[in-house]
Image: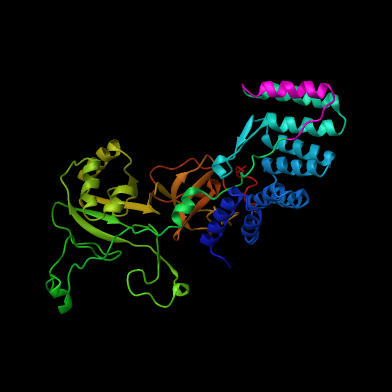
Amino acid sequence: MPSLGDLVRDWHRGAQAVERGDWDCALRLFAGVPEPPAKMCFNVGCVHLLAGDPEAALLAFDQAVTKDACMAVGFFQRGVANSQLERFQEALSDFRLALAQLRGNSAIDYTQLGLRFKLQAWEVLYNVASAQCRLGLWTEAANSLLEAISTCPEGAGDGLHASLDQVQKQGSLQPRQVPRGEVFRPRRQHLEHLEPMDFLGKAKIVASTSPDDWRSGSQPGQLQGPCVEQAGRQAPLSPGLLAVEAPGPGVSEEPMGAGGAAVGGPGSCVVVTVQCAFTVALKAPRGADLSSLRALLAQALPHQAQLGQLSYRAPGDSGPWIPIPGEESLQRMWRDVTAGPRGLQLQCQGAGGRPVLYQVVAQHSYSAQGPEDLDFQQGDTVDVLCEVDEAWLEGHRDGRIGIFPKCFVVPAAGTCEEPPLTPGPQQGHQPGKSCAKRF
């Protein structure tokens, strides 16, 4: 069973093969995905169209719209395949289904989902007219073009008027389709996460009892730089010291043996995922601004200080962690600290080199619908990295990053700023039905 990283790599290589016109390589890579999602079936159909095999393209587009019944561009391309096979009645039905999935909107922009194409309502109406021409429905075709002219943006009207004149002379039209070489591609951040990242830098000896280390300049029991303790243990605080808790959930993918002698050949290497947590003690002036705190933190944790999301613990034995997005929140933090006996405790969180905005808890289990999705079980805690839109979030869990429906989760206990959430799915819910659907 290939890993998620392997699937994303093959997906990316398949898209590159389409760009250079290597249809056989693209089909081999796309077809190698087990239980392909709707996007991958769509890609296979587009490649078959480019290779001049509309029959195979039709089968692939059938699978795409079966897996995602709201994929307007899938119906659009299936109509093109039916037109090439001279099945004009089926093509007309597909173009009308594509128009229905637009739901009254003037366009659907698929760029955010990885397809560099905006499906315009006037293009769908143009294709409706092209199928009606082939069926001899000249009056209906002219009406469809008039409707397209009324909805088209400035600049496209001249071409539609010329097409209308052609239809009035009972001349046929060639259907429009997705531009040559355009297919769904993996998200850029997913490709970036395939590259190994070093979040902590090289190890440094802080104290040693080994005579070999004495020769290199380290003395027995002599500390080198700031003292760092292992996960979960609090460094001893002196009066006036600032406790900075840094549970860095960032992911570092490094081949086994990268820090020492390689074991065996290249085939013996494995990917090691590391999650680190540690505590450091720093001294800070009371009332310091946000840039000063980050500069102080950068002395011990340079990468986390630059990319992590800073939060502080509210007063109390088990107060929640409150994000510090700006100076206003920082001033509130200093006011809260004066009311508490423990001083100031900060937390710096990040995942894959990106800050964690807040955390959510899964109310329902979610199964990934594609390689870009993040699956989880009921009760799991997920770090939110980005709010994709009103219905979808991008998050991190157990070293993996992906998107998931917002209606499956609720804010974690203690979260200060709760995102607007829609009600969870009903019993027996299938993902993508009652939640907002991705086009």
The x, y position of residue 183, in whole percent, is 61, 46
Task: Specify the quadrant of the image occupied by residue 70.
Answer: top right
Q: Residue at x 32, y 73 (%)?
A: 260
Whether residue 160 appears in magenta in the rendering, the answer is yes
422 sits to left or right of 227: right
In the image, which residues are magenta?
154-175
Residue 6 spot, x, y in % from top left: 53, 62
Q: Is residue 38 above or below residue 73?
A: below
The spot of residue 242 in percent (x, y) is 20, 52
User: In which quadrant of the rendered view does residue 32 lie?
Assistant: bottom right
Residue 21: image location, x then y, percent: 62, 50
Residue at (27% x, 66% y) in the render: 230
Is residue 212 toward the left or the right of residue 13 in the image? Answer: left
User: Which quadrant is the N terminus positioned in?
Assistant: bottom right
The residue nearer to you, when weighing 209 against 257, is 257
Q: Is residue 206 above or below residue 158?
A: below
Asked if the stretch drawn in magenta spans residue 231, the answer is no
Q: Tell me the quadrant of the picture where the C terminus can be found.
A: top right
Q: Is residue 89 left or right of residue 349?
A: right
Please state which of residues 375 and 160 is positioned toward the viewer in this rendering. Answer: 160
Q: Which residue is pictured at 60% across the width and 54% down the height? A: 369
